[in-house]
Image (cartoon, helix red, strand yellow):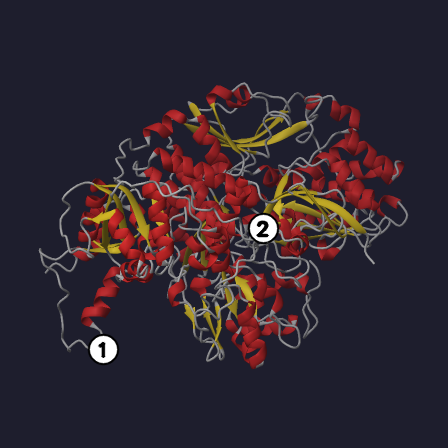
């Protein structure tokens, strides 16, 4: 980790670490910490408060000796979230979101924590606890009360790599030997390297599929120095956990991808932005970094390549979905609120600290490392001509084998459903809430760049699941996770959520559906970043794809009187004064 | 000296220096692109309100983020785009708690002004009535969070002498607020504080003792539109049709103050003409209590705060062919909706049990089967029944109301002047 402080000055980029220090030490960030910290940074207290309040793992009010974050994502909800939540409240005697005067337990809900294959799951002091049920909760709380450290009783998180293609087609989950990819750099020039990555047609695996080779080339051409390599390990899209598994199985591969990128563009510093939900992976990654330094895979003159100096540190996030957006992530790295930047410049032009920066996803770096290791020709054998290689899917929801599936690009949805032994699939959410939903009539669509793009999340729901319930969960998620800068996203998600609640009461009119569609389009057209643009995507698609379902939800009579105005409910408050 | 370039807005060729801001260049050429967060010397621009969304080379995007370049093609006046921009301003009205008639900034407010320029009569979105605080803690300022549109101007522009922020965004999502640093605020001079107040596009930043509103007529946006006046639609001159069919009007004041009815009478001598053309049926003006026939048009003042309002409104819907909501209260709740942020219990306890004038030991909140029941909040009329037209204002001007009524009844062409279109 970066050196933090001289006595009275703090570097802004080290702010998140400093705030974590306070949070871990005192269970909150106290007034005196804010005072001290703002003085060291030379900023006003309110600016600091702005940063603290942006991240939901930072608290100004004291949390507990044991702080419990229970995942409230849709998969968790379908697997018994409510019962587990009640169990936690019963066993601890605390309510979610309220302060515990004794300071023993603090309970919070949190969006997806990347354990969708073993829900319901929670983090206790950031150690993972999975497959929870009432009994297990009782056992955990009893142990914690006895003074057992959560580390001692937390769950070993299995990786659940359930499927890989035949050996000659597997890219990611094949044997990994540290240093093989980097050693190949000795023989090629950066230009050749970029050419190879371009030839492989590798696209950004965070979900936008921007050509990686092109990105690296842009960055290489920038005159400004130093340059930075940032690995986006802020895997926040609900239902995604592929990066977690990659970092757990082979963190070295990710680092090698970053080293490769550094060689390509001429960068000296790399940063892994790891989401705080994966704090339990931090030690492992740091150990590998240390190991790499000893192997001269990091440090000076790497692998004997003269003047190739590069090192990597890990920066922990603090809970904000929007930081997965690359410019928001950069702001967060700089110790600011994780608000997306305006799109005047690409990060390759002005990124971290306004210097040219490559931001790529964990999977992208891993793929890049494999391309160099195995050769572009090997990579091109797999997949389709337009999307060569394989893709990692994180499958969760109503199937018998949730987990990671390394599939060839071009595999059909039906095949994927068969592999994971989906149970009466009906509504499938691809790429998470901001992706798209598909119905079974589309089961022959192929997962590829030109048909069904998939960022990694693949959630299966069977026909008993209520679509509105799923969509309301998504709307709540976006309402909570919007950064709050632009009007359409901040207000729009709030408004849409209310509409969905109305729809769920079965009292909406056709007009309401039309309005949702219109308003969704407005948000799509005017929002500042992907979060707002994509927030209503699934909702709009669902209305198109499941017309029968939505028709059932409507009240048919109109007559100029608004039948859904609930007069009884409106006078309920007043009825209390009846003597 | 920057290069001169040519580009197009809605097909019109415009010459400008390369790299200047699109909103400013458009304005200089008489093309109005609505904007709120855009403030000339904030560079780079903020791009937070999105009200200036236009089509730039075929893609929708905020105009304030664009620098003009050669050959660029901009679409501004397209109806879809106009509707989108309008919807964004409506969204701000629905998101905040904007009670124009009681706001110090009314008439000088950029948000209100955008509403006038775009002719917003009602918001398509339900008002959220989120409970928000008013921060009286700062030494010199008062921060009215109800009115903040999160444009970010103050965050970027208001700094202390040593460059520290006085304002900052806090929290996120729909909880986002602009927080103020009390210590830093105390360091500002009086002039700087006033400057901050003026920088705010709405009435969210006020300075104690400095915020007394200017009288009506002296305010920034009272008379002049920044847009070129559209050619006024002329009433058809080919002689008045010999005889207009006589129509029936009904009017009612629900949870309102009768101000709109008063304003109706402001047409003065025009009333004499109107009396010849219309009959009044149920209306406080005639004191006819019950409908005697189906009416052509019903004018509704006020929203619904109790069950009697609802019953009357539903009767109006049944007995009138066209319903027109007149005034802010009927459109979205208006001033009575100030209670919407507070639970009803608290309102009633404050009024009947804990007020300054109640006797000690008072324990009765009026409740009787003959009394209408009070609703949990004040509802706009269109949440109870379908409303066909909306005329905004508190009150709307008489000319606006009568022009619109004539249009509805006899199809007369009309145009509402900027100065006739009012929220307060």
Residue at disc 1, secondary structure: loop
Q: Residues within 10 Å of mark 2 (few under 14, many from 20)?
A: many
Instruction: Give the number of the disc on residue B356.
Output: 1
Image location (x, y in percent) of residue A292? 76, 47
Comparing B384 with B167, the one in front is B384
Residue B66 in view of the camera: yes
Structural crowding at the residue carrying mark 1, measured as other residues with C-alpha within 10 Å and reported as few (<14), some (14–19) or many (≥20): few
Q: Residue furthest right?
A: A306
Q: Position of residue A329 (x, y in %)?
A: 63, 51
Residue at image coords 65%, 47%: A326
> Dot 2: what SS?
loop
- Residue drawn at point x = 25 percent, y = 35 percent: A559
* Percent position of residue B69, x then y: 75, 47
Residue A72 appears in view:
no
**Horizontal placement of B164 versus A109: left or right?**
right
Q: Position of residue A485 (x, y in %)?
A: 55, 55
Same chain for labels 2 and 1? Say yes or no.
yes
Q: How many marks?
A: 2
Q: Earlier in the sequence, mark 2 or mark 1?
A: 2
Q: Residue B283 shows which numbered tag?
A: none
- Mark 1 belongs to chain: B
* Quadrant in the rendering for residue A473: top left
Where on the picture, by quarter, is residue B99? bottom left
- Quarter of the picture containing the N terminus of chain A is bottom right
User: In which quadrant is the C terminus of chain A drawn?
Assistant: bottom left
Disc 2 target residue: B52
């Amino acid at each position: 980790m970066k050196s933090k402080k001289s006595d009275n000055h703090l570097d802004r980029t080290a702010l998140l670490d400093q705030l974590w220090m306070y949070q871990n030490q005192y269970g909150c960030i106290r007034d005196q910490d804010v005072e001290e910290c703002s003085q060291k940074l030379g900023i006003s207290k309110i600016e600091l408060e702005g940063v603290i309040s942006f991240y939901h793992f930072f608290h100004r009010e004291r949390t507990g000796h044991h702080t419990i974050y229970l995942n409230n994502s849709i998969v968790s909800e379908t697997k018994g979230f409510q019962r587990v939540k009640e169990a936690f409240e019963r066993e601890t005697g605390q309510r979610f979101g309220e302060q515990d005067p004794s300071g023993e337990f603090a309970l919070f809900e949190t969006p997806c924590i990347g354990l969708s294959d073993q829900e319901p799951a929670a983090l206790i002091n950031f150690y993972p606890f999975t497959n929870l049920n009432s009994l297990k909760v009782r056992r955990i709380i009893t142990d914690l009360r006895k003074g057992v450290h959560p580390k001692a009783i937390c769950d070993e998180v299995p990786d659940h790599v359930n499927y890989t293609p035949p050996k000659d087609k597997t890219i990611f989950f094949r044997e990994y030997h540290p240093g093989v990819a980097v050693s190949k750099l000795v023989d090629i020039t950066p230009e050749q390297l970029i050419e190879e990555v371009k030839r492989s047609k590798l696209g950004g695996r965070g979900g936008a599929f921007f050509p990686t080779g092109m990105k690296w080339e842009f960055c290489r051409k920038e005159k400004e120095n130093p340059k930075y390599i940032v690995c986006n390990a802020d895997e926040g899209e609900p239902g995604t956990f592929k990066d977690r598994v990659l970092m757990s199985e082979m963190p070295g591969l990710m680092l090698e991808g970053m080293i490769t990128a550094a060689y390509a563009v001429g960068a000296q510093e790399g940063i892994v932005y790891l989401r705080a939900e994966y704090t339990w992976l931090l030690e492992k990654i740091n150990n590998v970094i240390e190991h790499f330094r000893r192997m001269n895979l990091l440090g000076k003159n790497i692998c004997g390549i003269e003047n190739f100096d590069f090192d990597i540190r890990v920066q922990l996030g603090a809970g904000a979905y929007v930081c997965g957006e690359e410019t928001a992530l950069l702001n967060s790295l700089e110790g600011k609120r994780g608000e997306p930047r305006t799109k005047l410049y690409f990060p390759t032009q002005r990124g971290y600290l306004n210097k040219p920066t490559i931001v790529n996803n964990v999977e992208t770096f891993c793929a890049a490392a494999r391309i160099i290791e195995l050769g572009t020709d090997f990579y091109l054998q797999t997949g389709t001509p337009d999307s060569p290689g394989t893709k990692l899917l994180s499958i969760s929801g109503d199937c018998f084998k949730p987990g990671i599936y390394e599939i060839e690009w071009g595999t059909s949805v039906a095949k994927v459903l068969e592999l994971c032994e989906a149970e009466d699939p009906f509504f499938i959410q691809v790429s998470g809430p901001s992706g798209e939903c598909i119905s079974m009539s589309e089961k022959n669509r192929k997962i590829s760049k030109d048909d069904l793009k998939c960022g990694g999340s693949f959630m299966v729901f069977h026909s008993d699941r209520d679509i509105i319930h799923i969509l309301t969960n998504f709307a709540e998620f976006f309402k909570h996770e919007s950064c709050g800068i632009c009007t359409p996203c901040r207000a729009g998600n709030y408004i849409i959520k209310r509409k969905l609640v109305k729809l769920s009461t079965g009292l909406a009119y056709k007009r309401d559906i039309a309005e949702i569609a219109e308003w969704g389009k407005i948000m799509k057209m005017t929002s500042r970043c992907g979060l707002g643009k994509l927030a209503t995507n699934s909702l709009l698609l669902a209305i198109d794809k499941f017309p029968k379902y939505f028709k059932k939800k409507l009240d048919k009579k109109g007559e100029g009187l608004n039948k859904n105005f609930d007069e009884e409910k409106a006078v309920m408050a007043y009825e209390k004064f009846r003597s | 000296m920057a290069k001169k370039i040519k580009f197009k807005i809605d097909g019109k060729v415009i010459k400008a220096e390369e790299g200047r801001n699109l909103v400013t260049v458009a304005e200089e050429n008489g093309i109005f692109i609505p904007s709120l967060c855009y403030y000339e010397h904030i560079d780079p621009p903020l791009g937070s309100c999105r009200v200036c969304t236009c089509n730039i080379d075929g893609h929708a995007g905020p105009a304030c983020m664009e620098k003009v370049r050669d050959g660029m093609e901009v679409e501004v006046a397209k109806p879809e785009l106009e509707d989108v921009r309008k919807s964004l301003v409506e969204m701000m009205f629905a998101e905040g708690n904007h009670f124009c008639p009681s706001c110090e900034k009314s008439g000088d407010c950029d948000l209100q002004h955008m509403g006038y320029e775009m002719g917003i009569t009602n918001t398509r979105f339900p008002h959220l009535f989120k409970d928000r605080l008013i921060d009286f803690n700062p030494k010199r300022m008062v921060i009215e969070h109800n009115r903040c549109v999160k444009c970010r101007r103050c965050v970027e522009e208001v700094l202390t002498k040593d460059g520290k922020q006085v304002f900052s965004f806090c929290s996120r999502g729909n909880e986002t607020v602009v927080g103020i640093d009390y210590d830093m605020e105390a360091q500002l001079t009086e002039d700087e504080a006033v400057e901050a107040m003026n920088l705010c596009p709405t009435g969210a930043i006020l300075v104690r003792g400095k915020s007394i509103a200017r009288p009506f007529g002296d305010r920034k946006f009272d008379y002049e539109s920044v847009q070129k006046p559209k050619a006024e639609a002329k009433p058809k001159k080919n002689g008045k049709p010999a005889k207009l069919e006589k129509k029936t009007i009904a009017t009612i004041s629900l949870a309102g103050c009768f101000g709109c009815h008063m304003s109706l009478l402001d047409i003065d001598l025009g009333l004499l003409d109107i009396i010849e053309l219309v009959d009044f049926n149920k209306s406080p003006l005639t004191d006819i209590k019950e409908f005697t026939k189906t009416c052509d048009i019903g004018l509704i003042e006020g929203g619904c705060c109790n069950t009697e309002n609802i019953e009357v409104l539903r009767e109006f819907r049944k007995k009138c062919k066209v319903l027109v909501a007149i005034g802010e209260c009927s459109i979205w709740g208006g001033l009575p909706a100030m209670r919407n942020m507070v639970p009803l219990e608290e309102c009633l306890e404050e009024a009947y049990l804990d007020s300054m004038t109640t006797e000690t030991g008072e324990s009765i909140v009026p409740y009787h089967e003959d009394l209408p029941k009070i609703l949990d909040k004040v509802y706009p009329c269109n949440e109870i029944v379908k409303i066909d037209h909306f005329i905004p204002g508190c009150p709307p001007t008489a000319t606006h109301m009568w022009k619109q009524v004539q249009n509805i009844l006899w199809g007369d062409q009309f145009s509402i002047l900027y100065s006739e279109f009012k929220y307060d």
